Image: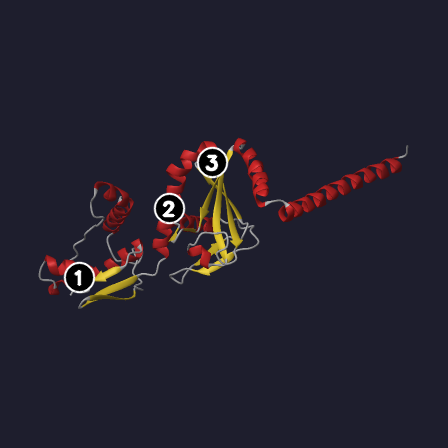
Amino acid sequence: MSPGSDNQSNFATVKTIISAAGSIAATAVVIRSVANEFLPYEFHNYLISTAHSFNRFSKDLTLVINEYEGLITNEVYDAAKSYLGPKISPSTRRLKISRSENGKDFNTDMVNGGEVVDLFRGETFKWVFVSKKVEGNKDIYFHRSAMKSEVKSFELTFKKKNRELVFDFYLPHILDFAENLKRHKKLLRIYTHDHCDWESVTFDHPATFETLAMEPDEKNRILKDLDRFVRRKEYYKKVGKAWKRGYLLYGPPGTGKSSLIAAMANYLSFDVYDLELSQVKNNSDLRGTSHGDC
């Protein structure tokens, strides 16, 4: 048989396989449509549950993280959204974008079906963003997401052997990352006490530790102390102490006291409260200002 005949025979075989595959796919679509339309709801659910039962032999575990749990925003969902934004691959072709609270940065989010693969302590974790359209509150319980046109969630898939790693280290790492990111991106404000209320305006002081006129050793000592204070927040909570740190600044006007306070606020992304202590006569007055009492 000539080479030309062999090629024609192979081509015919390939066409037959493609045709058969197309017929199988079309048949599967038809069967699925018929099943959805004509099979009883209970039997349909039984078939689905039976198919899902085969997944128990899988080595993977998937966590579904919904945007809302009842009427409460899911903190883990918000943290995952903040954490995954900077990790979206540069090759991604479609993104959602929004402006951050401070007006200086942009936030990037995944679109429906978007995926992010993350590495943590040598292990691989796959994230998928899922957005489902809903009609009113049909087939879903009455909660905040029922008032929206879509229900959003993240699906986190990993090896079952890494379950403890995820709950003990990976998820806490994501929560800590999101908390720090939120603090650094928020719009700072300065509060002043007026009679019974605290009033605020945007705090936009340009002072930073890079621009501050101070001895380098003293500057580094303060920075290390601030970093240590932030890291020990959970420790303060565990031992039952108030998470606070005090600094006493003194000196004549124009020596940089206000600039140092502004630099510390910008470094930590903390709001500033300006209280005239000459108007505070005793501890009761001081407590009253913190609660807004007259």
Q: Which residue is mark 2?
A: 175
Q: Is residue 111 visible?
A: no
Of helix, strand and loop, which one carries label 2? helix
Q: Secondary structure at mark 3?
A: strand
The answer to which of 90 and 157 lies nearer the viewer is 157
Q: Label 3 to label 2, Cα distance in Å?
A: 18 Å
Amino acid at the residue labelled 1: Thr
Q: Residue furthest left?
A: 281
Task: Give the residue at x 38% y 49%.
Answer: 75
Give left or right: position of 3 versus 196: right
In the rendered structure, which amino acid carries the disc numbered 2?
Leu
Q: Report the side of 10 relative to 150 (left or right).
A: right
Q: Is residue 285 left or right of residue 70?
A: left
Crowd tier of the residue under label 3, counting other residues whose Cα lies within 10 Å: few below 14, some 14–19, many 20 or above? few
- The alpha-carbon separation of the residues under discs 1 and 3 comes to 50 Å
Residue at label 3?
123
Image spot of residue 256 (x, y percent): 22, 61
- Residues at circles 3 and 2 in contact by the CB criterion of under 8 Å: no
Which quarter of the figure is the N terminus placed in?
top right
Q: Earlier in the sequence, mark 1 or mark 2?
A: 2
Q: Position of residue 198 (x, y in %)?
A: 23, 65
Q: Quadrant of residue 263?
A: bottom left
Instruction: Give whichever of discs 1 and 3 has the lower sequence position.
Output: 3
Judge left or right: residue 265 versus residue 142: left
Q: Amino acid at mark 3?
A: Glu
**In the image shown, does 215 or 97 lie closer to the viewer?**
97
